[in-house]
Image (tube, grey):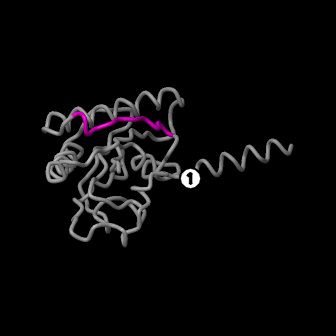
Amino acid sequence: MNKSIKGIVFLAMMATAGCSSQTAVTSPEKQESNVTPPATNVPAASASPVTSAPSPSGYGFDRWQTGPLGDAFFDFDSSALGADAQAQLKQNAGWLDNNSLTKVLIEGHCDSRGTAEYNLALGERRATTAKEYLKKLGVAPSRLEAVSFGEEKPFDTNTGEDAWAKNRRAHFVIKK
């Protein structure tokens, strides 16, 4: 029984841990004041393609998701880039062109549906698709690294299409 409780506590801690990247949790006070983040595409509530709507911070969904590079969102069970994701990646490429020494880690994420193995593979396809698109836009491959977290680091731990849509993404982390 004691092991069961410890296991549940451990899983609860893992589910709420979120993104551990220092870049993703940098407070707005620590950001450069001369960097204007591009608008982010916020997923729609339905299974239809995402819509463009700037968030209050211009980047993510809350005060912890700040930075100059926006997430690219994907439809359910897809690694294909929609028009909104392509537009976001073009904005990211523009920022990377102006910051030529910056390297980024592209994290592929999924919602909680599907097996862990399937979601790791889908997250890898999403990160790789975003990386390949940035390469086509002229960003040097040596500046881009792709990794998959599958469903392991959800942005929104709730269930339902609103939460799931936020988790189907390629997330960008600036490497220091």
Q: For mark 1, does the 10 Å Cα neighbourhood hold few (<14), some (14 to 19), or many (20 or more) residues?
A: few
Per the picture, the main secondary structure of the magenta-coloured stretch is strand
Q: Which residue is mark 1?
A: 17
- Is 46 or 6 nearer to us in this picture? 6
| x then y, percent, for residue 129 | 27, 32
- Is 171 or 159 nearer to us in this picture? 171
Q: Is residue 135 above or below residue 32?
A: above
Count of marks overlaid on the render = 1
Q: Secondary structure at mark 1?
A: helix
Q: Residue 3 is drawn in which quadrant?
A: top right
Q: Which residue is at 14% across, 53% downward?
A: 98
Residue 38 among those drawn in magenta: no
Q: Which residue is at 43% across, 27% downward?
A: 121
Q: Residue 141 is drawn in which quadrant?
A: top left
Tell me the amino acid under the disc marked 1: Ala
- Is 166 or 70 nearer to us in this picture? 70
**Residue lying farthest to the right in this orientation:** 1
| x then y, percent, for residue 4 | 80, 42
| x then y, percent, for residue 154 | 49, 47
Q: Which residue is at 42% across, 40% downward?
A: 109
Q: Which residue is at 48% across, 27% downward?
A: 118
Q: Is residue 163 left or right of residue 134?
A: right
Q: Quadrant of the N terminus?
A: top right
| x then y, percent, for residue 120 | 46, 31
Q: Residue 170 is drawn in which quadrant?
A: top left
Q: Is residue 52 left or right of residue 119?
A: left
Residue 145 among those drawn in magenta: yes
Q: Is residue 121 left or right of residue 13?
A: left
Q: Is residue 24 above or below residue 137?
A: below
Q: Is residue 140 left or right of residue 117?
A: left
Q: Is residue 25 above or below residue 120?
A: below
The residue stretch that appears in magenta: 141-151
